Image: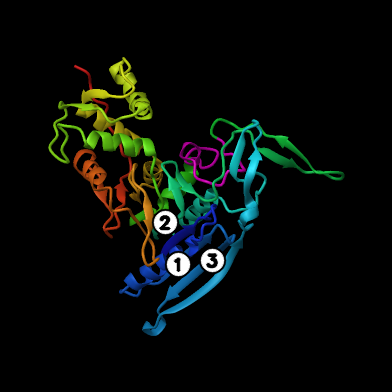
Amino acid sequence: MRNYIIMAGADWEFQGVDFQVLATNRRKYLTRQNTAKADLRFLMMDVRAGQVTRIDVTYPGGTKTEAASVVTTFGPVSRSSIGTFTDSAGVSRTGFKPGQFSVMSITDLYAAVRDIGQNAPGTLQEVSFFGHGWMGGLILVNSFDDRSPVVPVPSTGGAPTTVVATLGPTQRDPDDKDSRGQYDFVAPTQDAAALALFKAAFATDGFSWLWGCAFPRVIHHAMWAMEGTKGYATSGTGDDTVLTLDRVVKEDVDYIEGFLLPILKTPFPSRSTITTKFKFLKYVFCAANASAFAAQLATATGRPVRAALLGTYAEYDDPPDMMHVHTGFTAHVAFYKNYVGMTMDPEGRGYGVYPPGLTCTAPTVP
């Protein structure tokens, strides 16, 4: 039986989109593509409803049959789950309020993958996530990692109490439901044994798909400034070509300098222009993508991850079906294909394909 996991995050802004509808459309699409009539099992993880449903698609006598059953329930996400609050460090935040421990987490998705790795290794064809996203991965509920969570203390009587917990350097905040690449693929969240199961779940042609955005504005703007510079071309620009970026702003310069200062040893003299060789800019945008959650997930699973390339964003199909990357990023896509070696998703939806172990070699200074 082929396994699929499709998770739908909550639209924490409550602006009308129901990601579970898009997740269901993906399930229906994959079922239609199953012309060989192989048995399929879908685990549908609906964060907003707080429900995990297993749907088995079988073909007894050649006739399609679907059987659905709820296998796990969690706390639902409603408008009251989102609000403005002060965290343990005294910072005012607006998002997923702390203390909602019963709500589904990204760690529940990881556990579902490991279960397949334990009980049906090599059968997981696809893990898809529909929802909002950023370069750090999946936004299930717009929660926070404040490193000082307030947790309840069991009481035998009297008023319940809470304490501010102290977390280890790689320990996840229990209030945090969203993905965190720096914690999710190391102990205690997933130790070596857990990661072995995580990787074992996937079929040899399996993959993951992050359908949301990956749009750090600083990366988009810096790439735009580079792409409009005299001497740059969508293909064929030599590594030693000197480019002068005169449409950058301070944020762009600071970001690029953060990658290049250890190499160049000296800061850029201006905060409104950059003059440097193309190879250094190429390295910056490659390294940024290598640090993204999509790249980390690809390495952890040992399988490719389809995701929006940094500096691009996804939008809903019209009429609503699934999602695709906005078509206005042709220059960014050309850069990634021709200079970083990225390939694009085979369904033609504008997502890049992050390979396991994406690395970027730092250029040398003569």
Label 3 secondary element:
strand
- Can you give x and y, in whole percent of width and height, for residue 150 in the image? 68, 38
Image: magenta residue range = 171-191
Q: How far, Cα to Cα, is label 1 from label 3?
A: 11 Å
Of pointers 1 and 3, the one earlier in the residue sequence: 1
Of pointers 2 and 1, the one earlier in the residue sequence: 1
Vertical placement of residue 63 versus 34, above or below: below
Question: What colour scheme has been applied to the protein in the rendered image?
Answer: rainbow
The residue labelled by disc 2 is 127
| Quarter of the rendering containing residue 73 | bottom right
In the image, taking residue 153 as reference, residue 149 lies left or right, namely left
Location of the C terminus (image quadrant): top left
Q: Residue 208, can we see it? A: no
Residue type, label 1: Thr
The residue labelled by disc 3 is 53
Q: Label 2 crowding class (10 Å Cα cut-off): few <14, some 14-19, many 20+?
A: many
Label 1 secondary element:
helix
Q: Residue at x 16, y 29 (%)?
A: 239
Q: Identify the mark at residue 24; answer none if there is no mark.
A: 1
Q: Label 3 crowding class (10 Å Cα cut-off): few <14, some 14-19, many 20+?
A: some
| Quarter of the rendering containing residue 123 | bottom left
Farthest right residue in view: 158
- Can you give x and y, in whole percent of width and height, for residue 316 in the image? 39, 59
Disc number lying in front (1 or 3): 1
- Asked if labels 1 and 2 touch by Cβ distance under 8 angstroms, the answer is no
Q: How far, Cα to Cα, is label 2 from label 1?
A: 13 Å
Residue type, label 3: Thr
Residue type, label 2: Val
Vertical placement of residue 109 versus 38, above or below: above
